[in-house]
Image (spheres, helix red, strand yellow):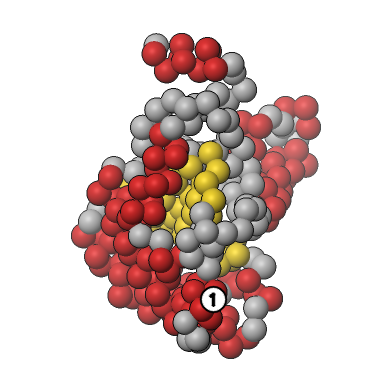
């Protein structure tokens, strides 16, 4: 990230860690589940805002591979909320031309949730207005490991040699290979880390951290993040002058 300010317009792809549901609820002396429920409302607000602004892709970190460590009752409530939200919202997403996709190891989820995930993906597969990617039971290290396993099998079969392996080859096997890498990463809730989210894909992503807890993250808060992004110069290893020349080309 650089401090040089140049306008870059809107990002094509935004990735968000939606942090702070539990703290939002605790501050109001409410059960954590209420915070998660309010967090779903924030998701609807931000998906609609991104769709209306012409954002190409939105990736949301809904459930990490580490979240299984949470209390069993809370995990169960999250699974139930996940299922009910998919059933309720997929038709509206479809009508708005949004393609729903999931990344992560879905096989750890209950059967009914896996079925809802498949139905949502199948129903919206041909939509082109925006990609909504839900990272569920996802971890960046898992993602890279899975990609390397695919390539290792190609080496073992003699199809390729170890010296043939390139970053582009790995990139083709990683989740979201068909989408542009995230231009903007947002984390709500005040923490300043990426927490094993899209580790490969965030290599040159602009990072934005806010103290706003996720249930309170609204379109105004999104606009502040977009303004911050627009005032950054993205260099990708080049000098500032080179970046300006490429921008004007």
Is 12 placed left or right of 238 in the picture? left
Report the front residue among 249 and 141.
249
The answer to whether any part of residue 183 appears in the image is yes
Residue 88: x %, y % from top left: 30, 75
Q: Residue at x 50, y 50 (%)?
A: 186
Which residue, as the protein is rendered here, is positioned at the far left? Answer: 95
Which quadrant, please, contains the C terminus?
A: top left
* Label 1 secondary element: helix
Q: Residue at x 52, y 46 (%)?
A: 208
In the rendered image, the vertical position of residue 175 relative to residue 229, given as above or below: below
The answer to whether any part of residue 173 appears in the image is no
Is 30 placed left or right of 190 in the picture? left
Report the front residue among 137 and 112.
137
- Residue 64, located in which quarter of the rendered image? bottom right
Q: Residue at x 54, y 74 (%)?
A: 23
Query: Which residue carries the number 1 mark?
Result: 22
Is 236 placed left or right of 246 in the picture? right
Residue 8: x %, y % from top left: 40, 29
Which quadrant, please, contains the N terminus?
A: top right
Q: Residue at x 42, y 18 (%)?
A: 247
Is 235 placed left or right of 150 in the picture? left
How many labels sit on residues? 1
Residue 185: x %, y % from top left: 51, 47
């Amino acid at each position: 990230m650089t401090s040089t300010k140049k306008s870059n317009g809107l990002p094509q792809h935004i990735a968000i860690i939606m942090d702070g549901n539990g703290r939002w609820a605790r501050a109001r002396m409410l059960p954590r589940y209420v915070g998660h429920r309010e967090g779903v409302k924030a998701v609807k607000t931000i998906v609609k805002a991104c769709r209306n602004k012409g954002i190409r892709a939105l990736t949301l970190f809904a459930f990490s591979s580490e979240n299984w460590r949470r209390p069993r009752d809370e995990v169960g409530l999250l699974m139930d909320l996940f299922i009910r939200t998919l059933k309720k919202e997929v038709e509206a997403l479809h009508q708005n031309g949004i393609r729903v996709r999931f990344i992560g190891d879905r096989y750890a989820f209950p059967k009914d949730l896996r079925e809802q995930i498949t139905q949502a993906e199948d129903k919206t597969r041909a939509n082109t207005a925006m990609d909504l990617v839900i990272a569920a039971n996802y971890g960046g290290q898992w993602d890279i490991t899975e990609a390397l396993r695919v390539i290792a099998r190609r080496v073992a079969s003699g199809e390729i040699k170890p010296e043939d392996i390139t970053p582009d080859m790995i990139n083709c096997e990683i989740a979201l290979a068909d989408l542009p890498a995230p231009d903007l990463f947002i984390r709500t809730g005040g923490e300043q880390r990426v927490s094993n989210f899209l580790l490969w894909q965030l290599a040159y992503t602009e990072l934005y951290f806010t103290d706003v807890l996720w249930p309170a993250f609204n379109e105004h808060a999104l606009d502040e993040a977009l303004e911050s992004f627009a005032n950054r110069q993205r260099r990708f290893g080049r000098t500032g002058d080179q970046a300006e020349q490429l921008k004007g080309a």
